[in-house]
């Protein structure tokens, strides 16, 4: 295939960067995938919704840390190099995952248990705040110009792959351990796996090639700062934040929170809910290179508009219909509808953001607005959904999802077509 005809060194770099991204997101999503098991261990309350709400609060704290990580490591990637940023982010992820793996329970250590969980999640949030910007920038700069959409789509493909890996680990553990064993100690296993994978990726990333965009910059280039980003790229930053808000909220709604929704609202057992999400994630993964290639052919904006408009239209009807579903097959097919629209965003959002900013501030420009949008809207998905459910107005969440996705559609309309006006000048 012509799309695959790129130099071996560049291909190895893309694969290496993608593999590291997968492990980072596996570590991040393992928390969401196993929260239904460790929630009673750290928050011993009788009501399952209250337990999930407590773990969701700590989940949200991780998102609060992501803008800080994006700011610190976005600047780091712009000044020290994309490769250095990738190495630092995965080192922090290793620390966070290992802390969760050894965290004491509430029964054993009282408040020290949930406090350790909180600190670990903060480290993971710092890590991922830098990971997204560094990996999105690295893969976008490494990809050849004519097929940048196809190759850059691997950034989100491996992101979903990390989430899917966390789900698969859950499926395997559910097959070999009882629910009581998973709740007592089995939930620690995925975090041990994630910590050692992160260590392996750290060693891998130290040997990656640096991108031409970073190496070709002038020695007297402007220093990457949040002040400079706001002063010279305010419009782009606001639009990236709006786009990230809708895309992040939709992603966490249909993948991370959906597992809990199928268990806690629709009424499927935990294992069935996990299987449904696994199938949905496989579908979303396969859609990434498809929509990336379509963006190379027809442009980035049509793909993003498919999400921003189509995704907003189908959001509420999907949830309202799921409430009445008893068949796992029907539930899976329903979830695939919004996820297909979602692929228009996930395959191309990182590339569009990278193409909007010049090289000297690209890492920060991609990372910081994205992290802020995700912290406000993506990180609070579970808290808002569970709070509205607890208040007896769960239906309001469905229309909230539609409104925020619609906001991403508005942002897309105001963006330029970066396929023709990309600021990544190297091929």
Image: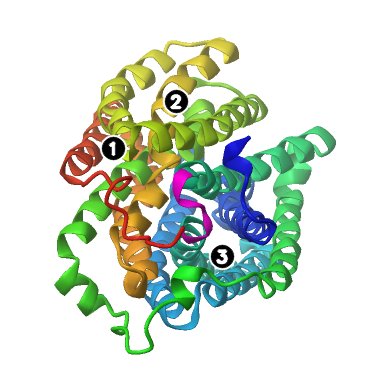
Q: Which residue is pictured at 46% across the width and 57% down the height?
A: 427
| Image side of residue 71 versus residue 166, left or right | left
Q: Nearer the viewer, mark 2 or mark 3?
A: 2
Q: Position of residue 315 (x, y in %)?
A: 32, 25
Taking depth in this image into account, of 128 and 327 the one nearest to the observer is: 128
Q: Which residue is pictured at 76% across the width and 65% down the height?
A: 196
Give the SS element for disc 1.
Answer: helix
Q: Which residue is pictured at 15% across the width and 73% down the height?
A: 231
Give the SS element for disc 3.
Answer: helix
Position of residue 92 relative to residue 280, above or below, is below
Q: Is residue 374 magenta?
A: no
Taking depth in this image into account, of 341 and 423 the one nearest to the observer is: 423
Q: Residues within 10 Å of mark 3 (few under 14, many from 20)?
A: many
Taking depth in this image into account, of 255 and 145 the one nearest to the observer is: 145
Q: Which residue is pictured at 37% across the width and 72% down the height?
A: 68
Position of residue 205 relative to residue 7, above or below, is below
Q: Which label number is shown at residue 43?
A: none
Cα gap from disc 1 to disc 2, whole angstroms: 16 Å
User: What is the span of residues highlighted in magenta in the rendered image?
Assistant: 141-146
Q: Nearer the viewer, mark 1 or mark 3?
A: 1
| Residue to which mark 2 is pinned | 340
| Residue to which mark 3 is pinned | 117
| Image side of residue 179 versus residue 17, left or right | right
Picture quadrant of residue 369: bottom left
| Residue to which mark 1 is pinned | 301
Residue at the farthest bottom position: 220
Cα gap from disc 2 to disc 3, whole angstroms: 34 Å
Q: Position of residue 37 (x, y in %)?
A: 64, 45
Q: Is residue 375 visible?
A: no
């Amino acid at each position: 295939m012509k799309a695959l005809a790129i130099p071996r060194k560049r291909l190895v770099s893309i694969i290496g960067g993608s593999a590291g991204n997968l492990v980072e997101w596996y570590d991040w999503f393992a928390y969401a995938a196993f929260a239904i098991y460790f929630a009673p261990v750290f928050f011993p309350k009788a009501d399952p919704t209250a337990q999930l709400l407590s773990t969701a609060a700590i989940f949200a704290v991780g998102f609060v840390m992501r803008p800080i990580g994006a700011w610190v490591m976005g600047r780091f990637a712009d000044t020290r190099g994309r490769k250095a940023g990738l190495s630092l982010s995965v080192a922090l992820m290793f620390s966070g995952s290992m802390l969760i793996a050894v965290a004491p329970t509430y029964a054993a250590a009282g408040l020290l248990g949930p406090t350790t969980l909180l600190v670990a999640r903060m480290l993971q949030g710092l890590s991922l705040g830098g990971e997204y910007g560094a990996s999105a920038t690295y893969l976008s700069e490494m990809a050849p110009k004519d097929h940048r959409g196809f190759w850059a789509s691997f950034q989100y493909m491996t992101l979903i792959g990390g989430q899917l890996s966390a789900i698969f680990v859950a499926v395997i553990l559910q097959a070999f351990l009882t629910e009581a064993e998973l709740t007592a100690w089995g939930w620690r296993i995925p975090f041990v796996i994630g910590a050692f994978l992160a260590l392996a990726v750290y060693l891998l990333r130290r040997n990656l090639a640096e991108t031409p965009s970073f190496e070709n910059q002038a020695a007297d280039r402007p220093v990457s700062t949040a002040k400079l980003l706001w002063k010279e790229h305010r419009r782009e930053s606001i639009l990236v934040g709006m786009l990230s808000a809708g895309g992040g909220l939709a992603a966490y709604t249909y993948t991370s929170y959906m597992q809990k929704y199928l268990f806690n609202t629709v009424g499927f057992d935990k294992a069935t809910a996990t299987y449904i999400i696994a199938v949905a994630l496989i579908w979303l993964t396969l859609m990434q290179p498809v929509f990336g290639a379509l963006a190379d052919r027809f442009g980035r904006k049509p793909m993003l508009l498919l999400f921003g408009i189509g995704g907003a239209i189908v959001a509420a009807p999907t949830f309202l219909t799921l409430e009445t579903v008893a068949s796992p097959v029907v539930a899976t097919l329903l979830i695939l509808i919004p996820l297909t629209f979602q692929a228009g965003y996930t395959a191309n959002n990182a590339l569009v953001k990278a193409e909007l900013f010049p090289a000297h501030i690209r890492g920060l420009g991609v990372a910081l607005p994205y992290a802020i949008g995700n912290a406000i809207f993506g990180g609070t998905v579970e808290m808002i959904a569970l709070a509205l459910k607890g208040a007896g107005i769960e239906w309001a969440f469905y229309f909230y999802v539609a409104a925020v996705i619609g906001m991403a559609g508005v942002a897309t309309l105001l963006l330029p077509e970066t396929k023709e006006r990309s600021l990544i000048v190297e091929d």
